[in-house]
Amino acid sequence: MELTQRVQEEIDNLKPRLQELGEGEVEVISVDEKTGTVTLRIFGGRLH
């Protein structure tokens, strides 16, 4: 399984908890397999 797919699966696993905590969304924008850099977009939600 490639890194991008693994990252997406982990985000999908975390989404229900993240939504419960902050009422927001997380989206995978990119994964650089050479450097291991993951870029996410976090939107919506509430500030504490």
Image (cartoon, grey):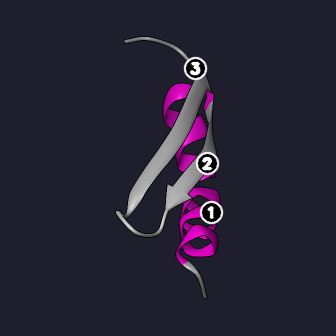
- First-in-chain label (1 vs 3): 1
The amino acid type found where label 3 is placed reads Gly
Q: In percent of the image, x 37 and y 64: which residue is there?
A: 36
Sort mark 2 into few (<14), some (14-19) or many (20+) by Cα contacts within 10 Å: some
Residue 38's disc number:
none
Q: Quadrant of residue 14?
A: bottom right
Residue that numbered label 1 is attached to: 8
Q: Position of residue 22 (x, y in %)?
A: 51, 27
Sort mark 1 into few (<14), some (14-19) or many (20+) by Cα contacts within 10 Å: some
Q: Position of residue 18 (x, y in %)?
A: 53, 41
Front residue of 28 and 46: 28
Residues at circles 2 and 1 in contact by the CB criterion of under 8 Å: yes
Q: Position of residue 8 (x, y in %)?
A: 62, 63
The answer to whether 32 is drawn above or below residue 47 in the figure is below
Q: Quadrant of residue 13?
A: bottom right
Front residue of 46 and 40: 40
- First-in-chain label (2 vs 1): 1
Quadrant into which the C terminus falls: top left
The amino acid type found where label 1 is placed reads Gln
Residue that numbered label 3 is attached to: 45
